[in-house]
Image (tube, rainbow, N blue to C red):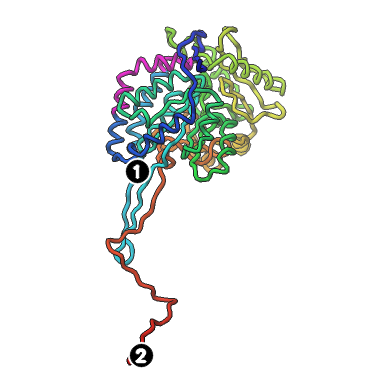
């Protein structure tokens, strides 16, 4: 009997989906067989097929959002915004394809023309995360299909039902079954997919540990594209902000949306020592009002549970570790329902702690760090191996200019949260946050490769240097 993967609701523990574990080699073989015909279609044909996909998702919005909410634990209102992002990705990708990978023709010497066109890689593997199990893999899949690639998609083993629903919508819209394949499984199937000789590249969103393992695995395969979208340890700096209530709201949104399970979530709050208490008080007022509940609850919660019990246990252990290093809890990471993975939003002062860990605590944990001046704030913002997102809340545009110029990050915001990056702009980080393959609007760049052609309607050439004089026989 084939091994099965079972998905359960974090909020209740109830089973919501099960399916057989797939075979990576078989899925890649199916995609390779289907790819040539798909690639031979015009880009207009592929775009129109994907627009039908957007219509399918739009028609099934409520059903899709309910599944995402149940499988991830995120509130229903938030799951609906994710479905809307899936729909919007098609038009954004069409615009990106036209802007980032257009056909261009230039005049050259001797009446020649230089033409630049783009080709698909072939078969691309996509490994998706659990926090945005539809939107983030879709951000790779849509531009990959639009460029003419076939795709083998392995969703996170924690959210396979959402992955299966997404692929079903592609097939319902007319994307051939061989062109997008679903691989169900856990880490072993992910490793097997990455190792397949039949893939021409891999597009990954997930943890830095898994990303580094893939980077090592692909080191001897420079012929294959590897796009890594990894995690963060993002700072949010508050300096002379005139509206503390607004600042507190932005901080809470940055740190606790999706129960802190966003790669762009603020992990470190950097403030001026001695001028921080009123801001902390405003943050705590909001924290104390946050509803943590079932994703379908009424009234709707701000936060649901984290993805599973193991994750909740790890986060609680990490929070205890912060305290043991000298952190002083302002709001503790509590477990309101011991048998389920609900966590309350936490805030801990790490200013006097020793040996602060530079890691992504993927949950509702915000670390407060007090500094003496703005130069120290910039130094602290850069005190990380990561470089995904950063924000500054200040009334002074000159401070923002200094922050922008000196902070190492792929997303730098002013008076806005660290999260909620726009899909019509590039998205990616530096350092341990990626490998310089920004996604979102720039995903078109890694889904096709440029081909330069020098073209002439007839063969014509002459060699002007380096030849001996032609032999001319003497007349008889």
Relative to 276, does residue 15 appear above or below in the rendering?
A: above
As helix, strand or loop, the secondary structure at mark 1 comes to: helix
- Give the residue at mark 1: 99
As helix, strand or loop, the secondary structure at mark 2 comes to: loop
The count of marks equals 2
Q: In this view, does 369 lie to the left or right of 471?
A: right
Quadrant occupied by the C terminus: bottom left
Mark before the other along the chain sequence, 1 or 2: 1
Q: In front of the other: label 1 or label 2?
A: 2
Residue 265 % position (x, y): 52, 26
Q: How crowded is mark 1: few (under 14 residues within 10 Å), some or many (20 or more)?
A: few
Residue 20 - label? none
> Can residue 422 be seen in the rendering of this structure?
no
Residue 30 % position (x, y): 41, 31
Residue at image point 28% right, 63% down? 458
Which of 428/396 is in front? 428
Q: Distance between the residues labelled 1 and 2?
A: 63 Å
Relative to 326, does residue 144 appear above or below in the rendering?
A: below
Residue 116 magenta-drawn? no
Residue 413 % position (x, y): 48, 34
Which of 47/287 is in front? 47
Q: Magenta part mainly helix, strand or loop?
A: helix
> Can residue 112 be seen in the rendering of this structure?
yes
Q: In this view, does 461 lie to the left or right of 335?
A: left
Which of 232/283 is in front? 232
Residue 474 - label? 2
Residue at image point 44% right, 15% down? 69
Which residue lies most toward the bottom here?
476
User: Which range of residues does the magenta coloring cover?
Assistant: 52-77
């Amino acid at each position: 009997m084939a091994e099965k993967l079972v998905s359960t609701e974090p909020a209740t523990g109830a089973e919501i989906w099960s399916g057989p574990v797939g075979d990576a080699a078989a899925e890649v073989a199916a995609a390779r067989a289907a790819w040539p015909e798909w690639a031979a279609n015009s880009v207009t044909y592929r775009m129109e097929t994907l627009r039908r996909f957007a219509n399918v998702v739009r028609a099934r919005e409520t059903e899709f959002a309910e599944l995402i909410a149940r499988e991830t634990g995120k509130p229903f209102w938030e799951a609906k915004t994710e479905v809307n992002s899936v729909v919007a990705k098609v038009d954004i990708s069409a615009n990106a394809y036209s802007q980032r990978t257009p056909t261009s023709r230039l005049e050259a010497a001797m009446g020649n023309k230089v033409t630049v066109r783009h080709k698909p890689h072939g078969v691309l593997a996509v490994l998706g995360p659990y926090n945005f199990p539809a939107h983030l893999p879709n951000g790779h899949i849509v531009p990959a299909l639009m460029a003419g690639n076939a795709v083998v998609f392995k969703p996170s083993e924690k959210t396979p039902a959402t992955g299966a629903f997404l692929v079903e919508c592609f097939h319902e819209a007319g994307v051939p079954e061989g062109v997008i394949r679903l691989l169900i499984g856990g880490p072993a199937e992910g490793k097997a997919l990455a190792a397949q000789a039949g893939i021409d590249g891999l597009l990954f969103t997930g943890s830095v540990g898994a990303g580094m393992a893939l980077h090592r695995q692909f080191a001897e395969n420079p012929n294959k594209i590897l796009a890594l979208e990894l995690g963060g340890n993002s700072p949010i700096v508050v300096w002379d902000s005139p509206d503390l209530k607004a600042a507190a709201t932005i901080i809470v949104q940055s740190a606790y949306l999706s129960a802190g399970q966003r790669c762009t979530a603020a992990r470190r709050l950097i403030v001026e020592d001695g001028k921080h208490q009123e801001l902390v008080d405003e943050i705590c007022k909001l924290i104390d009002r946050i509803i943590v509940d079932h994703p379908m609850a009424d009234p709707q919660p701000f936060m649901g549970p984290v993805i599973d019990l193991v994750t909740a246990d790890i986060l609680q252990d990490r929070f205890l570790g912060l305290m043991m290093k000298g952190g002083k809890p302002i709001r503790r990471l509590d477990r309101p329902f011991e048998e389920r993975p609900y966590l309350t939003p936490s805030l801990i002062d790490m200013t006097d702690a020793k040996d602060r860990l530079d890691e992504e605590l993927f949950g509702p944990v915000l670390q407060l760090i007090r500094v003496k001046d703005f130069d120290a704030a910039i130094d602290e913002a850069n005190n990380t191996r990561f470089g995904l997102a950063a924000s500054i809340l200040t009334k002074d545009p000159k401070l923002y200019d200094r922050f922008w110029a000196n902070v190492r990050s792929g997303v730098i915001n002013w008076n806005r949260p660290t999260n909620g990056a726009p899909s019509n702009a590039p998205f990616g980080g530096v350092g341990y946050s990626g490998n310089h393959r920004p996604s979102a609007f720039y995903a078109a760049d890694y889904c096709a490769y440029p081909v330069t052609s020098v073209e002439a309607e007839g063969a014509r050439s002459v060699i002007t240097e380096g030849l001996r004089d032609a032999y001319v026989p003497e007349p008889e």
